[in-house]
Image (cartoon, helix red, strand yellow):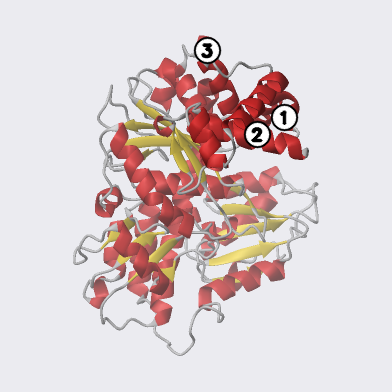
Amino acid sequence: MHVEDLLRLESLDLTLLWGEPPLLAREISGVTATDLEEPGRFLQPGEIVLSGLVWWSAADEEATADRFVAALRGAGAAALLAGEETHGRVPDVLVDACRRHGIALLSVPVHTSFRAITDTVYLRQWGDLSRRPAASSYALPENVRGELSRLLAEGADPATLLTRAVAHLGTPPCYVLSATGRTIARTPTAPALPAAEASRQLASALRVDPEASPYGQWFLHLPGAVEVPPRMLHEIAEVFAQYRQGSLRREAAAQAPARELLALAEAERSAAAPLPAALRACGLPERGPYTVMVMATGAEERTEADALREVLRHLAGHRFVTAHLAGSGTAAVIAEAGTGVETEVPAGVDARGAGAGDAAAGAADSGSPGGSQDGVVAALKGLWPALRACDEATLPYGGISAPAATPADLNGALVQARYALTAARQAEGPNLTAVDDLTTLEALLSGLPADVRTAFGIHALGPLADDSNPSHRMLLETLDTFLTHNGSWARTAEALHLHVNTVHYRIGRVELLTGRDLARLDHKLDLKAALLCR
């Protein structure tokens, strides 16, 4: 377990006050709780130190905090976790001392006990017996664990981490797979694995981070007959859990430019002037075409973002950024990596084929097409069943815009994507709709908000909208059949088993009650739309 793992445990609710990435990547060897002013002789290298700060008072000089932290540094402590209960907060002089001596400092809120932290560390370090078989005493060799910790701190890519993790086993074929079967990393001996085939292997693979959302989950898959002790597999999985958390932190840090871009896209076209600069800040080209996609799952914001990013990471040769929209849903702006003016890709921006994110090779290994807008839409529709299978309790809906040729067109593209999202909620099937799919009157109307559809139906049908009246239901049935048979009196009478005169009478009643003339094409279309909106 590493220091940064403590920060991602919501149950502990710890706050990082100071600590650079290499310090947060330090491995924890144990826990010591102390309130001695100079605790160095009681500490072991790699331990985290829990202190309630009873040894410090507001009257103390800076030297007191400095001596305490210097003792931790001298003993090789991994980090200091300071309780807030005694003084209400962690003193600034302690933060400064930790910065000077290079000791990561985390604050512990009043509602988190030191016992909870201690239990968490040792359960994670020695294995949670509920999910780590205790039959084997084997684990990663110490030199391998040290090398992996160093590679993590240096920012090594996941393929390197995986190869080094299993090198002492002869580098057997091994994969790290995403929740939809995307290959995040594979060893040199592992052949490319199509996403569909990889998805079938997930049931027997080891979850990397049990705390991840269903869409953000990674899996360690070791095919073949290589015998690996279960505890060793869990330790390798722990390495990738730490890598994944580091990636999430980088993505979170890069969210501000993405939010700014989507906010500008939501604004009126008159506000489009800053869009090129916002695209540059996100690492996207200043010239289109762009595609906008909006997703809604009904889940929390983080889970929804995981779902959208996961499906988009299958697109080879594309860059994208995502952000939560002001109203609801999460949106992405997608561009081909080779279009427009190339810019440096900031940390956290996904660039399929550009080496960013969690292994650019993953998209190519998945076998998903890139290229044209049609290819993107086809790829996403093909992936949607796999995305839905990630979490049976959540149903993702998606809407995709037509290509936006210029930055100024992003506003219209976002409107289109939202409209297509509304249509997807009404449609049967994969629950992903592109605006180009809306080629019929029924499909077009399905993109209208439900309250707008209802209001139109009520006003266009007039008294007939009250279908609790048996007479009105009869007239609506006749109208629907009449329009379905292109206004043919004879075919309508045949379909309803009525005399033609009866059909004439009923249609006359419909015209009287609605104020429409069914000899006119536009009035026929109005009433057909009203029936579809009911």
Q: Circle 1 is placed at which residue position?
A: 464
In the rendered view, does 265 fall on the left or right side of 178? right
Vertical relation: 153 (above or below) 130:
above
Amino acid at pointer 1: Leu
Q: Which residue is depicted at the point 60% across and 16% down?
A: 517
Amino acid at pointer 2: Leu
First along the sequence among labels 3 and 2 = 3
Q: Circle 2 is placed at which residue position?
A: 476
Q: Nearer the viewer, residue 381 or 69?
A: 381
Label 2 neighbour load within 10 Å: few <14, some 14-19, many 20+: many
In the structure shown, which secondary structural element does the residue marked by tag 1 occupy?
Answer: helix
First along the sequence among labels 1 and 2 = 1
Amino acid at pointer 3: Ala
Q: Nearer the viewer, residue 518 or 387?
A: 518
Disc 3 versus disc 1: distance between alpha carbons? 45 Å
Q: Circle 3 is placed at which residue position?
A: 271
- Residue 109 visible from this viewpoint: yes
Q: Nearer the viewer, residue 269 or 388?
A: 388
Discs 3, 1 touching: Cβ within 8 Å: no
